[in-house]
Image (spheres, rainbow, N blue to C red):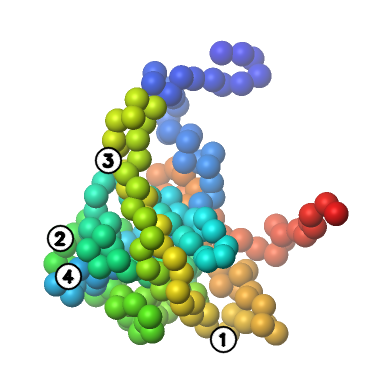
Amino acid sequence: MSEQFYSYLVENGHGLPHDPFKAIIAPRPIGWIASKSLDGVMNLAPYSFFNAFNNTPPIIGFASVGYKDSVKNIEDTGEFCWSMATKPLADAMNRTSQPVSADVSEFELAGLDAGSPTQVNVPFVAASPVSMECRLTQIVQLNNTEKQPLDTWVVFGQVVAVHIAHAYLNEGVFQLVDAQPIMRAGGPGDYFTISTDNGFFMGRPA
């Protein structure tokens, strides 16, 4: 270990009060993922490993540590929806992270109304300022460096429909700050939002 850096080998543990990995790769947008079982039970769960991976066509994805209900439902049906988790919806989002049996709908658990999709048979969070309907493209089980499969599954979906609340469009431009998205930032329960004070513009070099 040098005087300039605190260094550690991952295989030996970090030796700190809390694992810094999730705080370093942060803040991370939240994949608030809705799915539906073959029996018609609606599922809603937040995933902190989530992002966009392609523009044309738009593809988003999330990672699930464990083959959870969301992954099974999406693999069975080929469909899911993403809704933006926001500060006003933070408590409801947190309630949907509660471990419950597969026959319990987190929409009902969190008191959330289901929005009506147009292209898939999975609802989204009606109160969210933005939601996306997706069709499954890939489910990838991650491997480690020894090519051993991990109990982590990455789900990718192509966005086929987008729903934006009119209140967050100004002359056709989505007002991200007004939507108050929340992002996971490591720690036992640390979240951040964004503000205009922290924004800046930087164009690409010509």
Q: Name the amino acid, label 1.
A: His
Q: Earlier in the sequence, mark 1 or mark 3?
A: 3
Question: Residue 156's spot in the image, x, y percent?
Answer: 40, 57
- At horizontal 34% and vertical 25% (from top left) the residue drawn is 146
Please name the amino acid that badge 4 sits on.
Answer: Leu
Mark 4 vs mark 2: which is more N-terminal?
A: 4
Q: Amino acid at mark 3?
A: Asp
- The image quadrant where one finds the C terminus is bottom right
Q: Rounded to the nearest whole Å, what is the CA distance between mark 4 and mark 2?
A: 15 Å
Placement of 205 over or under 13, stated as above or below:
below
Q: Which residue is mark 3?
A: 151
Q: The disc labelled 2 sits on which kind of residue? A: Ser
Q: Secondary structure at mark 4?
A: loop
Q: Secondary structure at mark 2?
A: loop
At 54% from the left and 39% from the top, the residue drawn is: 24
Q: Earlier in the sequence, mark 1 or mark 2?
A: 2
Task: Name the residue beneath numbered marker 1.
Answer: 166
Circles 4, 2 touching at the beta carbon (< 8 Å) = no
Left or right: residue 84 versus residue 100 is right
Q: Is residue 5 left or right of residue 98?
A: right
Marks 1 and 2 close (CB-CB < 8 Å): no
* Nearer-N-terminus badge (4/1): 4
Are there few (<14), some (14-19), or many (20+) residues within 10 Å of tag 3? Answer: few
Q: What residue sits right under mark 2 in the picture? A: 101
Marks 1 & 3, CB-CB < 8 Å contact: no
* In-front residue for pair 46/57: 57
Front disc: 1 or 3: 3
Which of the two discs, 2 and 3, sits closer to the camera? 3
Q: Residue at x 70, y 85 (%)?
A: 171
Nearer the observer, 138 or 150: 138
Distance of label 4 from label 1 (alpha carbons): 33 Å
